[in-house]
Image: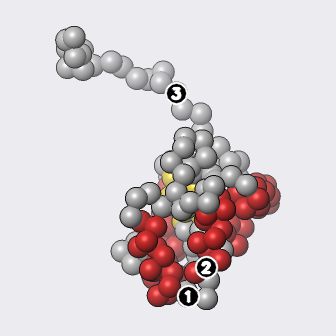
Amino acid sequence: MNFSITSLDGDLVRRLEPRSSMPAPWLDAIAALAKARIPVGVLVAPVIPGLTDHEIPAILKAASDAGAQWAGKVVLRFPHAVGSLFSAWLNHHVPEKSDRVLNRIRALHGGRLDDARFGTRMRGQGLFAEQILRLFRVSCRRAGLPSDGPELSAVAFRRPAGTQLELGV
């Protein structure tokens, strides 16, 4: 199980994701699951370059301290109309950072706010993607978190009896 944490700044989270829980309850949930020996990890997601990317080390440290056993990250992208909504949000809440954030997102996605191509859409490409990846890797090492979760196994999977899943083609 993974928990996504965008920021540890409660004020920013309240403005960015008004219906989401604050970071402390997510960290408490990680701690409770870890204590119950349930595998749990953290996703720094989405990483918003120029707004939240500097928090990667603190998020990973807090998650590790809470008991997270691995970490991952997802870089922000804007499919469809989300880009214009986020641009308006930036101009309203952090106008002094708006241009920098949007320019970095474009730099990650080949000049656009979105790159739907498999393999790059969640990571980005170019200088800022490399900087975010390096910061993430160093921060994972310092926090003692591998950047991959447990290996999944299908050993216990049992195909249901009967024809329930057959298409009959």
Residue furthest toward the top? 169
Is residue 5 positioned above or below 35 on the image? below
Which of 63/18 is in front?
18
Along the line of sight, which residue is nearer the eye, 38 or 51? 51
Q: Secondary structure at mark 3?
A: loop
Give the number of the disc on residue 99: 2
Q: Is residue 139 visible?
A: no
10 Å crowding of disc 3: few (<14), some (14-19), many (20+): few
Percent from the top left, x then y, of residue 10? 52, 82
Question: Which residue in the structure is indicated by mark 1?
Answer: 95
Q: Amino acid at mark 2?
A: Asp
Horizontal side of residue 46 vs 107, given as left or right? left
Frontmost of labels 1 and 3 is 1
Give amino acid for label 1: Pro
Instruction: Give the residue drawn at x 52%, y 57%.
Output: 114
Query: Which sits earlier in the primary sequence, circle 1 or circle 3?
Result: 1
Mark 1 and mark 2: Cα distance apart in space: 8 Å
- The kind of residue tagged 3 is Ser
Name the mark nearer the viewer: 2 or 3.
2
Q: Which quadrant of the structure image shows residue 59? A: bottom right
Q: Earlier in the sequence, mark 2 or mark 3?
A: 2
Q: Which corner quadrant of the image does residue 95 belong to?
A: bottom right
Question: Tag 2's secondary structure?
Answer: helix
Q: Which residue is mark 3?
A: 153
Taking the image as drawn, is residue 129 in sight?
yes
**Gap between marks 1 and 3, in whole Å?**
47 Å
- Say which residue appears at 41% left-offset and 65% top-offset: 82
At 61% across and 56% down in the image, what residue appears?
A: 109
